[in-house]
Image (spheres, grey):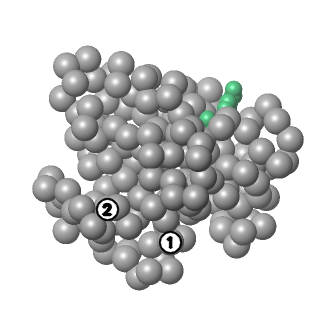
Amino acid sequence: MTTRLLFVCLGNICRSPSAENIMNHLIAQRQLGNRVVCDSAGTASYHVGSCPDRRMTQAAKAKGIDLVGQARQFNVVDFDRFDYILAMDRQNYRDILALDPAGQHADKVRLMCDFCRTHPDREVPDPYYGGPEGFTYVIELLLDACEGFLDHILEHPVATSR
Ligand code: 4NP
């Protein structure tokens, strides 16, 4: 049984690829590769095809995590393909739910920071227009949220998992 996770931000070059690669790092550490599969997407199309942002890649590398992947835009078919859709901020959350007007998939859509255990933040801040410390903070926050989320999905396997 595999649980499928999709991490979503605006551009899919900073926060959501970090969440995807951090989660893959934790999955490898815990040897859970056959149980959890990750992907990421952006609500916007500006950066489709781009690699993760260089500043974000540097901040992740400093914590021993390589960022790989190419940006893509969120698509309504993702509602069926994934068990959980994790929004980085409230705007991402609203933009995703706007693509599901009947609310059929609303239960799958969650805020990433709901799973933080040590950080009080409610959203993953957008680091794009700020300095390097913002990128480092995003990695630390996502490590906390991903640890909490991985424990959550292991404790609460979803009925729809394949
Ligand atoms: P992300 O960050 O949503 O975490 O990938 C951003 C990337 C690009 C832009 C904004 C945020 N942008 O305005 O191009």
Considering every residue shown, the one lying at the far left of the view is 159
**Quadrant location of the C terminus in the rendered image:** bottom left
| Screen quadrant of the N terminus | bottom left
Q: Which numbered marker is on residue 26?
A: 1
Indicate which disc, 2 or 1, sits on the residue closer to the N terminus.
1
Q: Which residue is label 2 attached to? A: 153
Picture quadrant of residue 93: top left
**10 Å crowding of disc 2: few (<14), some (14-19), many (20+):** some
Q: Residue 66 in the image: x percent, y percent?
A: 66, 66
Query: Where is residue 157 drawn, in percent x and y?
Result: 22, 62
Q: Which residue is at 38% across, 40% downward?
A: 110
Residue 12 visible to the viewer: no
Which residue is nearer to you in this view: 97 or 68?
A: 97
Q: Quadrant of ligand 1?
A: top right
Q: Is residue 97 above or below residue 124?
A: above
* Closer-to-camera residue (134/21): 134
**Against 13, is 76 above or below?**
above
Residue pictured at 79% horizontal, 31% vertical: 129
Residue 112 rendering spot, x and y as whole percentages: 47, 46
The residue at the far right in this view is: 131
Instruction: Name the spot of residue 71 as percent of width and height, x first.
Output: 56, 42
Q: Is residue 92 visible?
A: yes
Mark 1 burial class by Cα count in 10 Å: few <14, some 14-19, many 20+: some
Q: Secondary structure at mark 1?
A: helix
